[in-house]
Image (cartoon, helix red, strand yellow):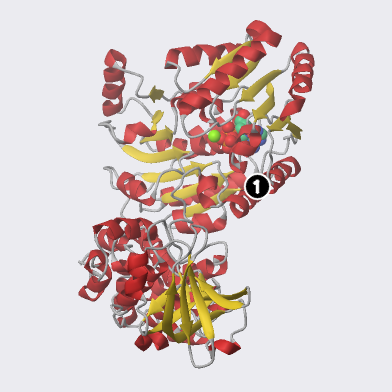
Amino acid sequence: MRPEILNPFYSSISNLKGIGSRYFTLVSNLCGGSNVFDLLAHLPYNIIDRRYTCPIKDIETGKIWTGIVRIDKHLEPKSKKQPYQVICTDVSGEIVLNFFKYYKDSLKKQLPVGSLKTISGKTEWFNGHLQMSHPDYISEPSNFNRLNTLEPVYPLTNGVTNKMMLSLSAQALEKIPDFAEWLDSSFVNKNHFPTFKQALLAAHRPQKLEDLSPHSPMRTRLSYDELLSNQLALSIARSKHKKRAGRSIHGSGFLRQKLIQNLGFDLTEAQERVLSEIYQDQEAPFQALRLIQGDVGCGKTVVAMLAMLNAVECGYQTCLMAPTEILAKQHMETLSAWAEKLDIKVELLTGKIKGKKRSEILERLALGQIDILIGTHALFTEDVRFKDLAFIVVDEQHRFGVKQRLELAAKAFKPDIIVMTATPIPRTLVLTRFGDMNYSKIDELPKNRKPSDTRVIPLNKLPEVIKALQRQIALGAQAYWVCPLVDESEKSDLAAAIERFESLKKFFGQQVGLVHGQMKEKEKDAVMEQFHKGEIKILVATTVIEVGVNVKQASIMIIERAERFGLSQLHQLRGRIKRAEHNSTCLLIYGYPLSAVAKERLQIMKNSEDGFLIAEKDLELRGGGEVLGTKQSGFELFKFANLEFHKDLLYTAHKDAEMILSLDPNLRSKRGEALRILLYLFKQDDALRTYLAG
Ligand code: ADP
Ligand code: MG
């Protein structure tokens, strides 16, 4: 249950004064939520200094001035082009208020002749007169002190004024409870942190420009609290998960030895190391959950196979999940070739396999006659029953969130799980998105890999590209041609691909093939098969997914409008052509106009083959959502923290969370109780409910 102390934060902003139903929607959208805490997480980005005041005659032109004036006269304009003017004075001089857009009657009512008003706004000299056009504020004299200050400026949206945001935030700021401190006191002192409440108050009422910096004490404090709640929740999940009873998998090694002898290559040191980490997980009598990261081509498949064989040696069943049908089929090809010599049973089950075949597979699975089942992620949701599933490998599946992993882990049989991803994930993202898992990295490619020759080429050189391609094809090469991502809609991607396909046909005739997402599975397979056999030399493809296939002899990758792809995507695509057997060429074709950032990104691709470095750069240039290929990245996960600036805070929060849990695993100490409130505050109560219930 949510602690009561948080109720004021969770009350709807509709209870605040001055917010009708129209504003309610606008403000909720602006703040990304409709409760008081969402509003309080919407911080000002600037300040307007309204502290300047003096007798009118001393006003320096151009300054924002706040003062009390007497309304002397209204001057209605003689033509439409002229402003409506209101003459105001104090004992020292005169200032003219100009209104270009106005309602006469309301101005007369708002500024009655003879009355005193506080006004605030930008002043200027024009034609020998001191003027103020459209004052920012016209208010009663009694409000002078309230206006004669620093005014925070909020990010706004059409229809929501800063005045409104000021009034709402002022009301919300009054609702902040006094929380027990959840941070370590020496840490607070060392960093000169205000309390959480002081930090929120100060962040909303900045006193100087530095206060707006992400590194100001108040913003640092708020960001730290948020990051700590994130790290604590993930650490709780990880530490509790580790202690969930699972099976001890420790095979004799006879299948693994046999496979290794027949591989035709030696495992890299990195593969060996990661395997031993997986074996340790498997052997421990707890449920394992581990993320394996490795660049394209580092050899994750064989690592997965060996780990699965460990389970098969014990008589258990295992399962390999791929993100797409094509990849599942590809795994099937690789694994069944290996399995043949080992005399074990591998089977493929996808959504496309139906009827008799399907029921036959399901039956054998339930009887334990299948050792390794390969399928798509859809398998999770279906009622597929194993006799004894002990180990699951999830391939390339970084799109899965923490929640789905919890669900998967909660399935029967308490399987050990490893998740493999080929998208190099920067450490900040690993911590914020995969912090519930153990983590291994295959940080080495097999020795024999030759680097690709990557070139960056403008679109207007397309004729030359085609000529060069003709020469290469004549020499027996095969190429992928990836078509531009036009926008989010698949239809227009498709149109672009079909157009390119048609135009390439003029040069290459029947040697060109096309695959796209809207083709039937059978048609797709047929085209892929032709490419495989070399009957098709150039494969035009729409999306990245369609190219997720390995055709060994293909050595050329042409990516049209490469500037529209994420660097990690480009890296993945390029990885498809890198082989031990041949040199490879990757052409990144860009269109105009190319922004400076886009240019820089393509240069990074040209200069580096290191997926991790590329991912880091991509992150710097584009943000986390793009790297993971999802909008909900670890970066937008945060209200206060910004990992561009708060990386170090994240690492500290990570250590802090580990330390907290090692001393107080169930958050029962005084600080632990305060931390529970922090978790609820930042809506991290999933972990609490799942693991620390009661
Ligand atoms: P990825 O990690 O991208 O999934 P794969 O597992 O598909 O990479 O491996 C890419 C290729 O490298 C495969 O043909 C695989 O057989 C080969 N390979 C894997 N490990 C090694 C190794 N240690 N030495 C040489 N080749 C290897
Ligand atoms: Mg792979």
Res 108 → quadrant: bottom left
SS at mark 1?
helix
Q: Furthest-front residue in view?
A: 78
Q: Where, quadrant-wise, is the C terminus in this rendering? A: bottom left
Can you give x and y, in whole percent of width and height, for residue 439 in the image? Answer: 50, 53
| Ligand 1: quadrant of the figure | top right
Q: Nearer the viewer, residue 626 or 408?
A: 626
The relative height of residue 160 versus residue 368 in the rendered view (above or below) is below
User: Which residue is painted at 22% across and 71% down in the image?
Assistant: 7
- Label 1 belongs to which residue? 614
Answer yes or no: is residue 454 visible: no
The image position of residue 677, as x and y in percent, is 30, 73
For this view, does 629 lie left or right of residue 407?
right
The answer to whether residue 420 shows anywhere in this view is: yes
Q: Amino acid at mark 1?
A: Ile
Q: How many marks?
A: 1
> In the figure, 50 relative to 383: above or below?
below
Quarter that holds the N terminus? bottom left
Against 510, is 629 above or below?
Answer: below
